[in-house]
Image (cartoon, helix red, strand yellow):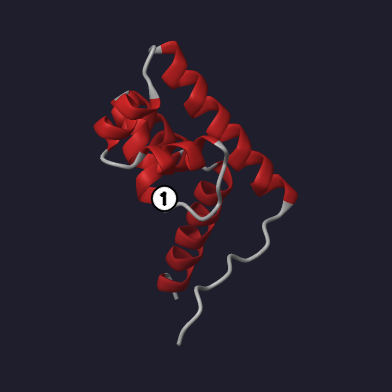
């Protein structure tokens, strides 16, 4: 008999970010005058799942969160992708790695 895996503890920063994201989703839903049932239906999830998302539940699948963003507004999903894409540290590391590869190929 297998037990469900317990989620790993979250850092305080991650827990706060999840709570903040949940509040933002709730505020966006309310600004659009959508009931839980309406947004849940648009996103293809249950009302219970939507309520858990709005409370910042860390066990929800990322895909469910992204479906809710898309149901609220496709531009919200685009903003998330854009934010990840604009990772300045990652960009600097990639440029550095490419420069190191170029120098190695010169020898």
Classify residue 98 as left or right of residue 34: right
For the point 37% across and 32% down, the residue is 69
Say whether residue 69 is left or right of residue 7. Answer: left
Taking depth in this image into account, of 20 and 49 the one nearest to the observer is 49
Residue 104 is situated, as x and y percent measured from the top left of the image, at: 46, 72
Crowding at dot 1, Cα within 10 Å, few <14 / some 14-19 / many 20+, comes out as few
Q: Position of residue 72 (x, y in %)?
A: 34, 25
Q: Work out which quarter of the rendered image holds the C terminus and state it.
A: bottom left
Residue 58 lies left or right of residue 102; in this view the side is right
Secondary element at tag 1: helix
Extreme-right residue of the structure: 12
Residue 19 lies, with reference to residue 14, above or below; the image says: above
Question: How many numbered marks have been drawn onto this rendered protein structure?
Answer: 1
Residue 64 image offset from top left, x and y in percent = 36, 46
Q: Which residue is mark 1?
A: 62
User: Residue 11 is drawn in which quadrant?
Assistant: bottom right
Where's the N terminus, which quadrant? Answer: bottom left
Placement of 44 over or under 27, stated as above or below: below
Q: Nearer the viewer, residue 104 or 56?
A: 56
Q: Residue at x 46, y 84 (%)?
A: 2
Residue 101 image position (x, y, % from top left): 45, 67
The extreme bottom residue here reads 1
> Closest to the observer: 61 or 91?
61
- Viewer-nearest residue: 61 or 106: 61
- Residue positioned 31% across, 32% down in the render: 70
- Res. 34 image quadrant: top left
Residue at screen point 36% across, 35% down:
68
Q: Is 107 situated above or below 28?
A: below
Residue 56's place in the image compared with 96, above or below, is above
């Amino acid at each position: 008999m297998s037990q469900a895996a317990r989620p790993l503890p979250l850092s305080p920063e991650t827990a706060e970010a999840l709570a903040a994201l949940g509040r933002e989703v709730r505020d966006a839903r309310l600004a659009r005058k959508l009931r839980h049932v309406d947004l849940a239906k648009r996103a293809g999830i249950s009302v219970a799942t939507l309520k858990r998302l709005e409370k910042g539940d860390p066990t929800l699948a990322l895909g469910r969160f992204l479906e809710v963003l898309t149901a609220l507004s496709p531009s919200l999903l685009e903003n998330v992708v854009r934010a990840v894409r604009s990772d300045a540290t990652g960009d600097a590391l990639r440029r550095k790695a490419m420069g190191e590869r170029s120098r190695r190929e010169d020898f």
